[in-house]
Image (cartoon, helix red, strand yellow):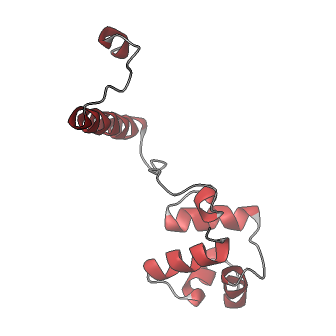
Amino acid sequence: MLDFGIRLKELRIKKGLTQEQLSELLGVTKSVVSYYESNKRAPSPEVLVAISHIFHVSADYLLDLDDGNTINIGGLDRKDAEVVRRLVAYMREVQDEAEGKKRFPNKEESDLSE
């Protein structure tokens, strides 16, 4: 299980940021970022939210409470978010058909169109 510090450092490096650059984005000092990455200090809820926005991940992902298999649609308007939802549903159907599964075995097909 990854801890917050390791996850933060991995995200920072993947995005090509130095500790100094991340500290400027967060409004903290470089040493505070270093403390976060070495688990000597935990961020405040406000800083945790800022980190999640910078790296486009959830706070749950940062805290290793989920595996990151989510799609952040927070920046999309309602219409675009619905397009993404429908695309995901379609992709699941195609995958299920390829695997010979039926997603809702107890429901009639007509019930799904509602």
Camera sees residue 15: no
Residue at 74 percent across and 71 percent down: it is 43
View extreme (front): residue: 100
- Up-down: is 97 above or below 67? above
- Up-down: is 102 above or below 83? above
Query: Left or right of 19: which side holds 86?
Result: left
Residue at 51 percent across and 74 percent down: it is 11
Residue at 37 percent across and 19 percent down: it is 105
Q: In this orientation, which residue lies closer to the viewer: 80 or 93?
A: 93
Residue 70 percent coordinates (x, y) = 47, 50
Residue 107 occupies quadrant: top left
Residue at 28 percent across and 34 percent down: it is 96
Number of dots carrying numbers:
0
**Quadrant for the C terminus in the image:** top left
Residue 31 occupies quadrant: bottom right
Residue 27 percent coordinates (x, y) = 67, 78
Query: Left or right of 21: which side holds 69?
Result: left
Residue 98 percent coordinates (x, y) = 21, 37
Camera sees residue 36: yes
Query: Left or right of 21: which side holds 71?
Result: left
**Quadrant for the N terminus in the image:** bottom right
- Up-down: is 1 above or below 78? below
Residue 56 percent coordinates (x, y) = 49, 61
- Up-down: is 32 above or below 45? below
